[in-house]
Amino acid sequence: MRTSKNLPAFVTAVAVVLGLSACSGGDDGAGASRAKPTNCTNKIVHEDATRVSVWAWYPNMAKVVDNFNNAHADVQVCWTNAGQGQPQYEKFQTAISAKKGAPDVVMLESDQLVGFEIQDALVDLAPFGADTVRRNFSEGAWKDVSQGTAVYAIPVDGGPMALIYRTDVFRKYGITAPPKTWPEYAAAAARVKAAGGPVFGDFGSNVPAVTTALMMQKGAQPFGYDLSDKQNITIKLDDQATKDVLTFWGDLAKNGLVGKEDQFTTDYISGMVGGKYATYVSAAWAPGYLTGAGVGGGTEKGTWAVAPLPQWDPANPVEVNWGGSTFAVTSQASDKAAAAKVAMGLYADEPSLTDGWKSQTIFPLNTGVLTSTEFVDARSEFFNGQTANRDVYIPAANAYRGAVYSPFTVYYYAQLQAQIVKLNAGQTTGAQAATDLHDEIVKYAKTQGFTVR
Amino acid sequence: MPRAVASDPPGTAPARRRSARRGALGWLFILPFLIVFVVFLIGPLAYAGYLSLYTKGLATGTTFAGLDNYTRAFGDPSFRKGLWFVLRFSLVVIPLQMIVALVAALVLDEVTGRLARFSRLVIFLPYAIPAVLGALMWGFLYSPSFGPIEQLASVFDVRAPFLLSQGNIFYGLLNVVTWQWAGYYMIIIYAALQSIDSSVYEAARMDGANARQIALRIKVPMVTSALTLILIFSLIGTLQFFTEPQILGPIANGTVTPDFTPNIYAFNLAFRYAQFNYASAISFALGFVVFVAVAIFMIVTRKKGSIFT
């Protein structure tokens, strides 16, 4: 009886670790597998060509992949959607640690690049002819994907931010012009609320990238980091700008002027459709995702419009960015030259880019598109015929000065999210949240072996 | 074979050979299980144990850490907070599940007929639904925009509480877990009840016991071993709480933090923050806590009664 008594406990102890270790157990150190990827979502046009596996989540990806495969007889893309954003990064991170299982080419947002570069998970594309596509991009766009002479990814789209709003709600509550400054935004929110209207916007905890962008707009520079000096990092999250922005949004949420719902959830989207939010502080790619989720159709058709992002100091406007993705070649790619060719050529052809920007799924960074009259003068269907690119998004993209990200963006976002949750629950103040966040990130950086300055 | 055994006195060489052969045959039968056991259980366990002795920093690379990860784990506020949550949760969810399961089993044991069979199936059904789907379904039911709870409340012109908010998630999860497991435990108790000889009831009735007395004085004591089994199962399961909060996390407005329970913490450490070494240590630390909890429980119950003998 003795042994059987201890058995459940033993089995438990075993089972606890099983889940984790089973996934990391395949560390054979042999590097990439040479097998041809076969579980493609798309159709392979040229069976004998080199196959390159790709993870990406752009809504129009199927079309983009077909365009590429039809145009290339020597290389074929085998595409998988491994989840949008975080879920995909988790899979990629696991594959890096396991040293196998990663795709040849992976879609990454620019704020994630450094975190993977520092783990040597991405290939420098400069020796594979990245310079040939360099002239398609602006200086700033190229800077976001490179470190010194090394090029870690090929940019596809950016996320210049703006104020998306509902004209019917504005009209109903007598907001004649979209707010130009953040104090005006708060005043308009109070006015709508006082008249019994819906919440003005949303301070969602699950979009820490937005909050970070808004902090940077006020002048915060959370991180200073350069891969050529791996050990050293500058962290400054307890500065006045960060405190001010967290206080501003925390107060709006506390006073019920903006919602506290997580974004991209079914509840949030249904709220968007039903006019529960008067504005949406978001990026240029948002309309594509919203239409895909059923926003802006039916009776809401033509109710949306877009204005430049409100400013703190209208005399010195600052434009910020949310998201924006790239294609990187992983160090596990079996045929790096072919993979580089895909990274440079996928979503870079004219039909794909046009399809992307017309559906407002992407805001292209390709200067050829950015300067074409068709793009500049395009009338957005989602924004009721507004020339959104010319009036709002192109100026915002041109004024964007870039950002510096840390090598532990995922951890930073998780901690910022925790602080926003506390802020929304009224358990902390904006200033306290900034200080706690700073301390937590500094502590983490130290445990990871960084020297914090 | 009987003849051979009879002709050779026990302990002689041929007999030993035969028993060795029989032993080898036994190993052969157990081999498929053994291979799976070693490859998928012992091997990964050993590997995770090995990982937990090292530490890896983004900027420093991997170094040998000895037991540092373990001292760090038990001093880690995230790990402690998660442990505290699952311990508190166990204290409420386990008695609740057992009471629901026991009452349902006692009632079903009394009634017979088609309705009883149907009820048994319905109560068991939640367990047959994968935990992931169950959690997703409850996520919909709890939804503040289109869930039925909210719609019901709006009939009376009030707002229903959001059961996944920071203050309510304990109860929200309590409901999901009880719904999921009570039926399964009910079947175990019911099976134990069915195995009781009906002559015992007959004797009790002749002594003048009514239905309630039979239930409490005869049935419950006779299924205590089943109840103990359930208790251990649910203790182990609850301390490793993972699936339901992980699935409901994305719609819980950040209430399900990356360190919500120790298992979720280990998952996030490994797959989001690339800290497989520390995640392994956290997992072993949790395994240790589960081991201790079950051991304490067993010692306590052994003193009280004769459940294990």
Image: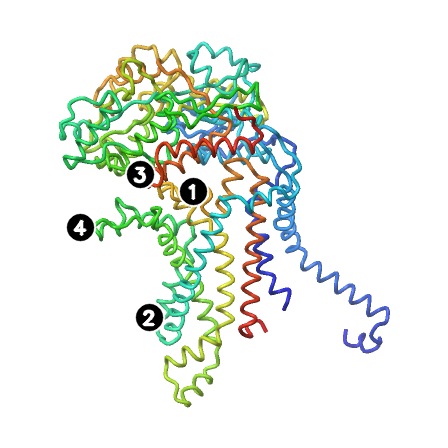
Q: Nearer the viewer, residue A418 or B307?
A: A418
Q: Quadrant of residue A10?
A: bottom right
Q: Secondary structure at mark 3?
A: loop
- Image quarter of the N terminus of chain A: bottom right
Residue A426's place in the image compared with A280, above or below, is below
Question: Residue shown at 52%/71% (left/top)?
Answer: B225
Amino acid carrying label 1: it is Thr
Q: On the image, numbered disc 3 is attached to which residue?
A: A261
Give the chain letter at badge 4: B
- The reply to the same-chain question for discs 4 and 3 is no
Q: Amino acid at mark 4?
A: Asp
Residue A82 position (above or below residue A143) = below
Mark 2 → mark 1, Cα distance in angstroms: 43 Å
Q: Are marks 2 and 1 in contact (CB under 8 Å)?
A: no
Along the viewing direction, whichever of A154 and B117 lies nearer the viewer:
A154
- Name the residue tied to disc 4: B157
Q: Earlier in the sequence, mark 2 or mark 1?
A: 2
Q: Is residue A163 left or right of residue A46?
A: left
| Camera-side residue of A185 and A446 | A446
| Label 4 with label 2: CB-CB less than 8 Å | no
**How many angstroms separate mark 3 from mark 2 (CA)?**
44 Å
CA–CA distance in space, label 1 to label 4: 32 Å
How dense is the environment of label 1, judged by Cα within 10 Å: few (below 14), some, or many (20 and up)? many
Q: Quadrant of residue A8?
A: bottom right
Q: Which residue is mark 2?
A: B115
Q: Are marks 2 and 1 on the same chain?
A: yes
Residue hosting label 1: B257
